[in-house]
Amino acid sequence: MCAIRQVTGEKGCVLLVYNYTGDRLNFGIAAEQARGEGYKVKMVLVGEDCAIKPKSEKVGRRGLCGTLLV
């Protein structure tokens, strides 16, 4: 929320958020709080399929490199 306040100008801001539960939850709450304070905030979810988990793991790795291109 603090970062949104610091960088959001007259036109608003866009949050690029990784499509993972914790990220979606936390950034979603921050966006709602900012909107409640009158800021213009849009949230874009970024998902990529380059993270491949080994069969022995229950949770996959986080593939983050594609967000640089967004």
Image (tube, rainbow, N blue to C red):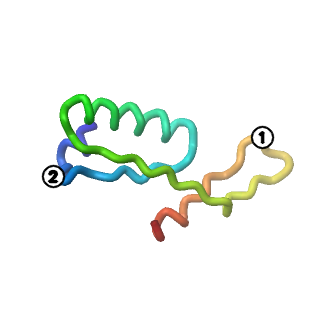
User: Is 65 displayed left or right of 34 in the figure?
Assistant: right
Kindly report the distance in space between the C-alpha atoms of the residues bearing marks 2 and 1.
42 Å
Residue sitting at the far bottom = 69
Instruction: State the residue at coordinates (22%, 50%).
Output: 12
Instruction: State the residue at coordinates (55%, 59%).
Output: 64
Of the 4 image quadrants, the one containing the C terminus is bottom left
Residue identifier under label 2: 9
Q: Secondary structure at mark 2?
A: loop
User: Is 36 displayed left or right of 67 in the figure?
Assistant: left
Measuring from the top left, give residue 65's x and y in whole percent: 54, 65
Of the 4 image quadrants, the one containing the N terminus is top left
Tell me which numbered mark, 2 or 1, is placed earlier along the sequence.
2
Instruction: State the residue at coordinates (67%, 60%).
Output: 49
Depicted 15 relative to depicted 21: above or below: below
As drawn, the label of residue 26 is none
Measuring from the top left, give residue 60's x and y in whole percent: 71, 48
Measuring from the top left, give residue 17's x and y in whole percent: 46, 49
Tell me the amino acid under the disc marked 1: Lys
Instruction: State the residue at coordinates (52%, 55%).
Output: 46
**Label total for image:** 2
| Disc 1 packing (10 Å; few <14; some 14–19; many ≥20) | few
Residue sitting at the far left = 10
The quarter of the displayed image where residue 3 is located: top left
Tell me the amino acid under the disc marked 2: Gly
Residue identifier under label 1: 58
Measuring from the top left, give residue 5's x and y in whole percent: 19, 42
Mark 2 or mark 1: which is in front?
A: 2
Q: Nearer the viewer, residue 10 or 23?
A: 10
The quarter of the displayed image where residue 4 is located: top left
Q: Secondary structure at mark 1?
A: loop
